[in-house]
Image: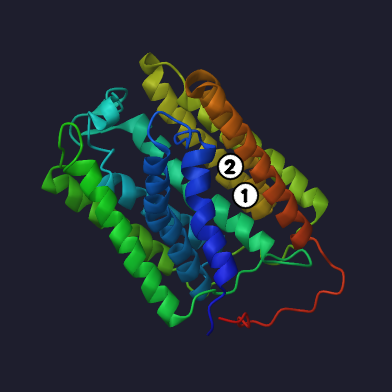
Amino acid sequence: MKTSFRPMIMLAVLSPLTAEFLLGDQYLSGMAPAGQQIGMLISFIALYGMGAVLIRELARRLRLGWAGLLLLALGYGIFEEGLITQTLFNPHYLGLNLLAPGHIGLLGIGAPWTVFVISLHVIWSICTPIAIVEAWHGSDGTADTRPWLGRAATVVCLIIFAIGAAAILTVSTVFASPPFLAHPAQLIIVAVLVLLVVLAAVRLRGRGSDVTASLPATPARIGWSALLGFLATTAFQLINGLPDRLAWLSFAGMLAVWAVALLIMVSRRPDPFGLAVGAVLTYAWVGMRSALGEAGLPGLVEQSLLILLFLAGLAWSYRRLLNRAGQPARPERSTVRS
């Protein structure tokens, strides 16, 4: 099979742009030099971007559907935060007191932080950019769920992902202030959890688990799905922002949002692109709030331009997805030139 380079590159770049820059955690005009920020973007493309590309490829090749893709995204979140950046266990990460609220001494984690940060990866690092790019590469109301990578491209993506993971692991442990490495037992538990989640996803192979596959996108379906995505992710962000003294309420609330959202998704079958639109709109206000509070005028301008860029990209993907004018039926296998 030949590689479809355009959607692959789009996904590799969109994932870190959504996860870090739209969120407002990174600014090219921020306190760190622009060159350093660009270097961080490259490292994020290697880790987040290649992770999203490889997860999507595995899910689509094995026909795992969105249920399996969500599980793989969960495995990625546990992998990155538990084994690579190790924020699940580092009480001094970036000088923040992330683990004190709702601390579980036996595991060495903060319960609210664990749910929150892993959810960020599931929703915004992996699933949202995949849904957007599949819509952009789709047509006639149907997202493109075909595999995109040939064998050589898959190997290259794996190598880049490994390099990115090793680089961020080094920065997060050896060059952390102070240097930090989680206890071996913690790392083993995380590795086992990642393996179990991936195996659970693979068990969905070929079961037609993608409940959205038989429902083509329509303006109405995308619209109410976007509203659902926005309300659910906004509620999630607001609940996470509760005071530290309400840490366990925040923990329970975030899990409740997940439970309700998953129940609605199973019963109502929302459109993945619509959900992604809602998630992007939530990160737009979260990132703008961060820019207003911390980034100054240059960061505010940069964040505003980034939000406009995302909105334009969503409109473009929406138009391509719903374009029915003379679109031939796509074959099951990729025919895009390498």
Q: Could you tell me residue 98's position as x and y percent? A: 31, 27
Which residue bears the numbered disc 1? 265
Q: CA distance from mark 1 to mark 2?
A: 6 Å
Q: Could you tell me residue 247's position as x and y percent? A: 38, 22
- Amino acid type, label 1: Met
Mark 1: few, some, or many residues within 10 Å (few <14, many ≥20)?
some
Vertical side of 1 occupied by 28: above or below:
above
> Considering depth in this image, is 22 or 276 the residue closer to the camera?
22
- Amino acid type, label 2: Ala
Residue found at x 61% / y 69%: 145
> Considering depth in this image, is 54 or 63 the residue closer to the camera?
54
Residue found at x 72% / y 66%: 142
SS at mark 2 in the image? helix
Kindly give the residue lying farthest to the left in the view shown.
Answer: 184
SS at mark 1 in the image? helix
| Residue 163 placement, left or right of 25 | left
Q: How is the image coloured?
A: rainbow
Q: Could you tell me residue 287's position as x and y percent? A: 54, 31
Vertical side of 265 occupied by 332: above or below:
below
| Residue 141 placement, left or right of 27 | right
Q: Could you tell me residue 107's position as x and y percent? A: 20, 37
Residue found at x 63% / y 55%: 132
Res 172 quadrant in image: top left
- The answer, for residue 12, to whether it is visible in the render is yes
Vertical side of 138 occupied by 264: above or below:
above
Residue 261: image tag: 2
| Mark 1 in CB contact with mark 2 (< 8 angstroms) | yes
| Residue 22 placement, left or right of 141 | left
> Considering depth in this image, is 189 or 320 the residue closer to the camera?
320
